[in-house]
């Protein structure tokens, strides 16, 4: 199914229960890359399993790059990019894609925005023509902006306002990042979405939507030379934006001195849960902090804790103590700046959420104290290495995995050698990463529960 | 004219690709079931999908939710492995093994790396032949099911769906909650599960699809390894055909949320109906996944009243229904219903335009190969082809079925399929 229903991927990529990227950035992709004179990076992933091709254009701009007080702009473009340009009518883009049996969609995250189409291989030129056109030539008139604003407000209602779990997560991110813009929801705050002006949108577009801020990924049944010829033809003439910074520098978080807690009680809640967040480095920020191995160690740490949903938390809290119905951990590695590591417990009915919370902390503390065993580490590594092949089973995955990694500060070399970097992690490095979980004063706890009377 | 030519050419290329990408081999096991196989040696992954006849529609009265419960417990320990030991092997070897109960069929799914194929086969065989149903595991899964049953009473789309089913399906088993109710789930015992498993698991009417890094010879030995010792007693019967009621009611249910879910529907077209493909196309024009559908354009693009609206035909072996679904702010529910009704009327009265029909055909034909981007989705396709008795050459013939729909046929089908006076509308949400 296509439709922007599924642009939820962009939002969900940052939620838990979803180990989208760490499992995925994989080696053994046969990649070729080159750069156009105007700064556009191009990566080609040939695969001739089926005569289809995916074009993914990733922009290095996301919700964390919006001007303060104007949340929702980055995501607004996920909608507006399907509107009229100087030479194309409203909706013509998607019409042309579907006319040729293709699919197209888009997604927005905190650090990037992506647009993709999957079509028969011989339509790649047309897709590039359309994508290049809307990179610089959107009209951004009121009659396109206003109905779409209504759609976005409905989208916010569907995803967030009607959904207590999402509402809580929005609050938890806001509590975690109080100085860094990761605290702003990707879709934007309702009152700010309502106030965004045409001028706000225009300035954002002119600054960020440019070849020198984009990565073009082409995967599927294509020849590298043909991609180069088509990319030169369609994207080559586009002017770069002079305002793109060398590095995206956002306000950083100060050290967190005291524990924070967000609690949401709502009639609509069926499954109470507690999630504990700690701020930790991402792949990219651990590199900038001079500890490139830390990101990989955190990926392994999460894999060891979760162990396919049946790790030590599960054994203690679900099976032995019967406090929970599920537990696990997650690490949002594909962020440009420091990110979150979390562990959670879904509370069994009849159990006080706070009782399972304390038990969860005790298990985490015991685990960090004794440290994972060599066997646990070896087995986690094996699972991650095996996951590369399972990920490759979906031929449409690969451009996206590479694109997300590149847009959040990884290099092509790192993406291709991911398996090697995972294999190189030592037990000491995992132990060091595990220390980051221990400090209760720097934790953020999110509690979702039923109202007292209803429990 | 030139443009048209490109379309035809493209269609051929894409259709050709289906034939190429989906080169289906039929392997006779000499004991009833056939294996339908698509080899793909480009990545060391093997995907198996199979289905038994019998599912939620066969839940005994008072034990609603049994098939669903069974699907959650058959992978919770088997043979000498208790739940923990069983899941440890699956986790260590990255084997994905699961079951899924549908109305008419009980599905099994296995995805494994080639190098763990033998272990994966052994685990699947054990779950089919020696599931343990240990009380600890059964009660743990029961807890999860109870939570989800309870959660469904709070989800506006689930509530709307069940209200519509209750209204249209009368006292047919499909009107019931497929996951069961709190009471029925609580009443299910390990003995119930075992008895149902013994009825469902049989070579009779079993259907198998296999895809990935596996040869014909390996396919047969996998079959023997996994299914060789299964019994061969008569499969459970299909539930009788649903007599879909025409009640044309509007049903409202109040929930404390800012947005209302709307679901509307009436009887649809049978899969064997000569106008099935025409019906599929006009439903796509009305509210298919594509951005340009009528409902999308009228309700989302022009008026910004919703984030998503779509329509579809559910044509199963024993029921057929036409549905549309959307959500909108409580204040705009009446306006949305009015538009939906008038679009229904317009489609019934005028049918699609030539241009709409051509576009729908190109989309429906051209996008088909994109459904098969994983070996698991190909294995699933192989099972569906057999369940619906579409034939091994369906992926190539499908193009012609759609191509041959004429404008006259599409208009006549639209008039027959879309019945504005028979629409039952369910609205679940806040005050409007």
Image (cartoon, coloured by chain):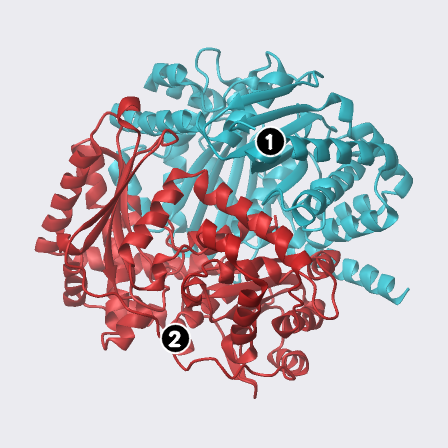
According to the picture, the residue beneath numbered tag 1 turns out to be B262
Tags 2 and 1 on a common chain: no
Disc 2 is placed on an element classified as: loop
Disc 2 to disc 1, how far (Cα)?
43 Å
Q: Which of the pair B236/A68 is nearer the observer? A: A68
Residue under the point 30% across and 66% down: A282
Q: Which of the pair B217/A100 is nearer the observer? A: A100
Q: Considering only vertical position in the picture, is B366 above or below B178?
A: below
Chain shaded red: A
Horizontally, residue B398 falls left or right of residue A293, namely right
Binning the other alpha carbons within 10 Å of mark 2 as few (below 14), some (14 to 19) or many (20 upward) gives: few
Where residue B8 appears, x then y in whole percent? Answer: 83, 59
Q: Chain of mark 2?
A: A
Q: Which of the pair A372/B278 is nearer the observer? A: B278
Where residue A288 appears, x then y in whole percent? Answer: 28, 76
Where residue B4 appears, x then y in whole percent? Answer: 86, 61
Picture disc at residue A27: none
Horizontally, residue A63 falls left or right of residue B358, namely left
Kindly indicate the quadrant of the structure image that contains residue A116. Answer: bottom right
Horizontally, residue A69 falls left or right of residue B292, namely left
Where residue A54 appears, x then y in whole percent? Answer: 60, 65
Q: Do we see residue A115 in this rendering?
A: yes
Picture disc at residue A248: 2
Chain shaded cyan: B
């Amino acid at each position: 199914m296509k439709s922007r229903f599924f642009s939820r991927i962009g939002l969900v990529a940052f939620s838990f229960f979803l180990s989208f990227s760490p499992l995925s950035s994989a080696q053994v992709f046969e990649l070729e890359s080159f750069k156009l004179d105007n700064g556009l990076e191009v990566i080609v992933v040939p695969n001739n399993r089926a005569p289809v091709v995916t074009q993914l254009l990733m922009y290095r701009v996301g919700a964390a790059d919006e001007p303060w007080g104007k949340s929702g702009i980055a995501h607004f473009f996920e909608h507006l990019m399907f509107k009229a340009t100087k030479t194309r009518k409203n909706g013509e883009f998607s019409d042309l894609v579907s006319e040729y049996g293709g699919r197209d969609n888009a997604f927005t995250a905190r650090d990037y925005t992506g647009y993709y189409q999957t079509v028969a291989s011989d339509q790649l030129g047309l897709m590039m023509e359309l994508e290049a056109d809307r990179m610089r030539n959107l009209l951004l008139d009121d009659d396109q902006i206003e109905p779409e604003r209504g759609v976005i407000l409905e989208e916010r209602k569907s995803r967030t306002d009607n959904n207590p779990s999402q509402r809580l997560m929005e609050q938890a991110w806001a509590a975690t990042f109080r100085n860094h813009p990761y605290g702003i929801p990707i879709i934007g705050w309702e009152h700010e979405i309502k106030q965004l002006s045409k001028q706000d949108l225009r300035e954002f577009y002119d600054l960020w939507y440019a070849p020198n801020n984009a990565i073009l990924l082409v995967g599927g049944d294509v020849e590298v030379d043909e991609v180069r010829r088509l990319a030169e033809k369609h994207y080559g003439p586009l002017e770069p934006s002079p305002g793109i910074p060398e590095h995206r520098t956002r306000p950083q978080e100060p050290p967190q001195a005291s524990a924070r807690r967000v609690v949401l009680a709502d009639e609509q809640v069926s499954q109470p849960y507690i999630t504990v967040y700690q701020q930790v480095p991402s792949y990219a920020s651990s590199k900038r902090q001079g500890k490139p191995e830390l990101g990989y160690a955190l990926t392994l740490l999460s894999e060891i804790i979760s162990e396919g949903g049946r790790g030590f938390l599960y054994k203690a809290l679900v099976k032995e103590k019967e406090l929970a119905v599920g537990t696990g951990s997650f690490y949002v590695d594909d962020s440009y700046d420091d990110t979150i590591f979390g562990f959670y417990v879904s509370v069994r009915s009849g159990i006080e959420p706070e009782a399972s919370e304390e038990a969860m902390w005790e298990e985490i503390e015991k685990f960090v104290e004794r440290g994972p065993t060599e066997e646990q580490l070896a087995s986690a590594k094996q699972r991650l290495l095996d996951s590369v092949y399972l990920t490759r089973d979906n031929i449409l995955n690969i451009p996206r995995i590479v694109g997300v990694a590149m847009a959040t500060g990884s290099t092509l070399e790192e993406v291709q050698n991911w398996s090697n970097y995972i294999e190189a992690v030592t037990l000491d490095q995992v132990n060091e990463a595990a220390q980051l979980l221990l400090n209760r004063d720097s934790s953020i706890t999110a509690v979702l529960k039923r109202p007292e009377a209803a429990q | 004219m030139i443009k048209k030519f490109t379309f035809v050419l493209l269609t051929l290329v894409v259709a050709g690709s289906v034939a190429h990408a989906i080169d289906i081999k039929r392997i006779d096991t000499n004991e009833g079931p056939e294996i339908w196989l698509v080899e793909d040696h480009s990545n060391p992954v093997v995907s198996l999908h199979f289905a038994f006849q019998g599912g939620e529609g066969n839940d005994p009265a008072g034990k609603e939710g049994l098939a669903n419960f069974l699907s959650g417990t058959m992978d919770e320990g088997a043979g000498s492995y208790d739940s923990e030991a069983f899941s440890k092997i699956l986790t260590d070897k990255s084997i994905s093994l699961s079951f899924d109960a549908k109305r008419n069929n009980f599905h099994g799914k296995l995805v494994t790396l080639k190098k763990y194929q033998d272990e994966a086969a052994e685990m699947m065989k054990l779950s089919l032949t020696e599931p343990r149903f240990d009380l600890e595991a059964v009660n743990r899964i029961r807890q999860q099911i109870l939570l989800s049953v309870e959660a469904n009473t709070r989800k506006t789309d689930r509530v709307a769906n069940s209200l519509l089913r209750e209204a249209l399906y009368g006292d047919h088993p499909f009107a019931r909650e497929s996951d069961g109710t709190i009471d029925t789930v609580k009443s299910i015992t390990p003995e119930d599960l075992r008895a149902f498993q013994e009825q469902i698991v049989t070579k009779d009417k079993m259907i198998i699809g296999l895809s990935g890094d596996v040869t014909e010879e390996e396919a047969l030995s996998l079959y023997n390894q996994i299914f060789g010792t299964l019994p061969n007693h008569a499969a459970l019967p299909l539930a009788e055909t649903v007599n879909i009621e025409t009640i044309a009611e509007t049903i409202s249910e109040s929930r404390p949320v800012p947005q209302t879910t709307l679901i509307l529907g009436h009887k649809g077209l049978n899969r064997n109906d000569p106008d099935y493909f025409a019906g599929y196309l006009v439903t796509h024009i009305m509210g298919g996944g594509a951005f340009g559908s009528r409902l999308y354009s009228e309700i989302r693009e022009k008026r910004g009243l919703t984030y998503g609206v779509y329509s579809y035909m559910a044509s199963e072996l024993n029921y057929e229904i036409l549905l549309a679904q959307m959500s909108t702010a409580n204040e705009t529910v009446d306006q949305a219903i009015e538009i939906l009704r008038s679009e229904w009327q317009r489609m019934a009265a005028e049918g699609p335009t030539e241009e709409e029909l051509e576009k729908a055909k190109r989309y429906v034909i051209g996008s088909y190969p994109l459904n098969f981007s994983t070996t698991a989705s190909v294995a699933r396709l192989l099972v569906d082809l057999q369940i619906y008795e579409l034939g091994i050459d369906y992926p190539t013939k499908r193009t012609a079925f759609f191509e041959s729909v004429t404008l006259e046929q599409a208009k006549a089908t639209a008039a027959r399929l879309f019945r504005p006076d028979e629409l039952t509308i369910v609205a679940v949400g806040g005050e409007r």
